[in-house]
């Protein structure tokens, strides 16, 4: 077995998993501790059933972040994180549809979420190789 083969059989970097997973868990916990504010913001963005979808999606992010961090059910965990960002990003950070004053902030959030989605996809691909 070559070094590259064994690298694919071991989990990704512990430090990388912990940084990514704990960051996602912190974001989810911030959503859950300010649930009324997050629901109101989602409602203002036109999210249907915001009172149900905000806590559900935050739970998806929390579970996915913890799963990646501890490398438990990694495919499901990474898919949960990816689903969160695929669903949330274009709706909540629609920089193309906001006024000029909000555009830069929404664009930054949109791009940050794309970066996090890319990392979730990379973790998913790695989990499929294990």
Image (cartoon, rainbow, N blue to C red):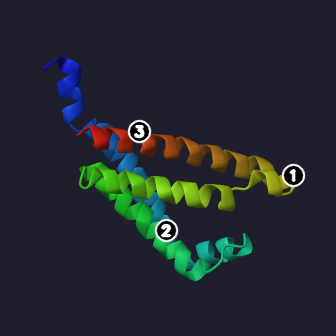
Task: Locate the C terminus by quadrant.
Answer: top left
Q: Which of 57 and 6 is in front in this view?
A: 6
Per the image, the residue denoted by label 3 is 122
Assess disc 3: are there few (<14), some (14-19) or many (≥20) residues with their C-alpha within 10 Å of its C-alpha. Answer: few
Residue at 22% in and 27% down: 7
| First reached walking from the N terminus: tag 2 or tag 3 | 2
Which residue is at 54% across, 73% downward?
Answer: 54
Residue farthest toward the top in the current orientation of the protein: 2
**Mark 2 and 3 residues: CB-CB less than 8 Å, in contact?**
no
Residue at the spot of label 1: 100
How far from the left and from the top, in percent, is residue 118? 50, 41
Evaluate whether residue 29 shows in this view: no
How far across and how far down the image is residue 74, in percent? 29, 51
> Is residue 42 left or right of 5 when viewed as pictured?
right
Q: Distance between the residues labelled 1 and 3?
A: 34 Å
Label 3 element class: helix
Compared across the picture, whether 108 is left or right of 88 comes to right
Label located before the other in sequence (1 or 3): 1
Give the position of the N terminus as an image quadrant: top left
What residue appears at the point 66 percent right and 73 percent down from the top-left corner?
Answer: 47
> Which numbered disc flags the more N-terminal residue, 2 or 1?
2
Rendering coords of residue 33 (x, y %):
48, 73
Q: Can residue 119 be seen in this view?
A: yes
Q: Name the residue under label 2.
A: 57
Distance between mark 2 and mark 3 Cα atoms: 21 Å
Locate residue 36: give its quadrant. Answer: bottom right
Q: Which residue lies furthest to the left in this view?
A: 1
């Amino acid at each position: 077995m070559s070094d590259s083969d064994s690298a694919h059989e071991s989990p990704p970097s512990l430090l990388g998993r912990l940084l990514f997973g704990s960051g996602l868990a912190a974001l989810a916990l911030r959503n859950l501790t300010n649930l009324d504010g997050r629901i109101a913001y989602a409602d203002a963005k036109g999210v249907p059933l915001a009172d149900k979808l905000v806590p559900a999606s935050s739970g998806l992010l929390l579970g996915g972040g913890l799963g990646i961090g501890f490398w438990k059910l990694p495919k499901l965990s990474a898919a949960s994180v990816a689903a969160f960002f695929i669903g949330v990003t274009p709706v909540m950070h629609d920089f193309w549809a906001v006024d000029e004053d909000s555009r830069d902030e929404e664009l930054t959030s949109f791009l940050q979420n794309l970066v996090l989605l890319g990392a979730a996809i990379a973790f998913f691909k790695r989990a499929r190789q294990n």
